[in-house]
Image: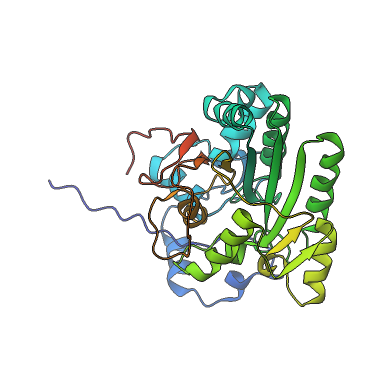
Amino acid sequence: MRPKPVVLLILDGFGLREAADDNAIYHANTPTFDRLSQTVPHATLETSGEAVGLPKGQMGNSEVGHMNLGTGRIVYQDFTRISKAIDEGDFETNEVLVSACRQAKAQGGTLHILGLLSPGGVHSHEDHIEAMIGLADSLGVPMTRLHAFLDGRDMPPQSAEASLVRFQRLETVHTHYKLSSLCGRYYAMDRDNNWDRIQNAFDLITKSQAEFSAGTAVEGLQQAYQRGENDEFVQATRLGESWEMRSEDVVIVMNFRADRAREITKALSAKSLPELNRPDWIPDLSVSTLTQYADDLNARVAFPPETLTNTL
């Protein structure tokens, strides 16, 4: 007897909650779903926190849900792996991260840290960025610059100030560290080949070129709000003195989710990229990423993907 086919049908964003308030699914007309719920054996799954390999209380997302469904077991996510490495001391001995810091120190260069500065935990987490700044300081990197991408999608649209205050204060703790630029994720984290947006972020990060400047990050953010921009859309803003990336410098991209980090990483690491205006670009700039964004990127990976077996 031939086995009957089985269909795995995923409804992204569809969830069950008894409360009717602010619940579009509860109020929607769903006759097929209602019939299946009443006539077919079923169960519910938790889609957040420790049930899907995330920290307790952390919301899930489509990528996390798909991975756990496809493997039929809890898969510890990159967020959890990296946080665990920080807690247990493995982060500060990570070969790729330590090597990047030592290279910057040996060459007398600047370590440029890029990433979504957010506690959202979907693409990155600011705790990881702070740990990286601390590691660079402990290894004697002569200058570390943070280029902060602002969220406003996985967090409320005007919520970046708390993160910026936190990372401004770190300048008094780590004397060779500077929060150097702001840019909304709309520009720095494009994933749809809108290279004009990436160009804005690239020029800011590599040459401190921006239409706007401010003395501090909070000042820059308030200026953006006055222009009517929410965090996601904050235009490139230089903070403090100018800089220009040199061949002695080193780059670390701190997002752990790949999709919105690929283009900016490619802009900084590709030997040829006709989509961008990069005259006299550094052909062998040292670039590392927290996780693997793509097989063809010229970048070292601090936390390579784990091999998953027995999947659908």
In this rendering, position of residue 293 left or right of residue 23: left
- Quick check: 60 above or below 22? above
Place residue 17 in its image quadrant.
bottom right
For the C terminus, the quadrant is top left
Task: Specify how the rendered protein is coloured.
Answer: rainbow
Residue 87 image position (x, y, % from top left) = 68, 26
Q: Residue at x 82, y 46 (%)?
A: 166
Q: Against 82, is 207 above or below?
A: below
Q: Position of residue 221 (x, y in %)?
A: 79, 64
Q: Nearer the viewer, residue 167 or 128?
A: 167
Q: Nearer the viewer, residue 67 or 295?
A: 295
| Relative vertical location of residue 31 with respect to residue 174 in this rendering, above or below | below
How many numbered marks have been drawn onto this rendered protein structure?
Answer: 0
The residue lying furthest to the left in this view is 1
Q: Residue at x 53, y 24 (%)?
A: 95
For the residue pair 13 and 239, the one nearer the viewer reads as 239
Instruction: Name the residue rendered at 45%, 53% in the picture.
Output: 266
Q: Position of residue 257 (x, y in %)?
A: 53, 48
Would you place residue 72 above or below residue 260 in this image? above
Give the percent coordinates (x, y) of residue 300: 46, 36
Nearest the viewer among 293 and 8 is 293
Q: Residue at left 39%, top 63%?
A: 274
